[in-house]
Amino acid sequence: MRIMRLLEAVAIAFYRTFGITQPTPQKLRRAVWFLLGTLILILVAFAAAGVVVFHNV
């Protein structure tokens, strides 16, 4: 999946930028799933806020 590769690149960039020791492939996969879950939660929160705001308009 392209989105997973993109998130993996973001995770690797984060590790390299902040000088964190490179993780094992298993931990990198966990970090990518965490990023994906966080992004989904943010999108759901924005959608819910949009529904609340525009429902009352």
Image (cartoon, rainbow, N blue to C red):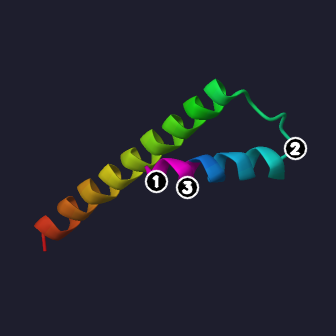
Tell me which secondary structure the magenta stretch mostly adopts.
helix
| Most foreground residue, 43 or 34 | 34
Q: Secondary structure at mark 1?
A: helix
Q: Amino acid at mark 2?
A: Gly
Between 8 and 50, which is closer to the camera in this rendering? 8
Q: CA distance from mark 2 to mark 3?
A: 20 Å
**Mark-to-mark CA distance, 1 and 3:** 5 Å
Amino acid type of the residue tagged 3 in the rendering = Leu
Residue 32: x and y, percent?
A: 55, 39
Does 51 sit left or right of 30 as displayed? left
* Left or right placement of residue 55 versus residue 43 in this view: left
Q: Are marks 1 and 3 in contact (CB under 8 Å)?
A: yes
> Which of the two residues, 5 or 12, is positioned nearer the viewer here?
5
Per the image, the residue denoted by label 2 is: 19
Q: Which residue is mark 1?
A: 3
**Few, some or many residues within 10 Å of mark 3 (<14, 14–19, 20+):** few
State the residue lying farthest toward the right.
19
Q: Residue at x 71, y 47 (%)?
A: 12
What amino acid is at disc 1? Ile
Name which residue lies at 22% across and 66% down. 53
Q: Which mark is residue 6?
A: 3
The residues tagged by marks 2 and 1 sit, at their Cα atoms, a distance apart of: 24 Å
The residue under the point 46% across, 53% down is 3
Where is residue 11? Give x, y as percent: 65, 46
Quadrant position of residue 15: top right
Q: Which residues are magenta?
A: 1-7
Q: Is residue 26 above or below residue 2?
A: above
Q: Secondary structure at mark 3?
A: helix
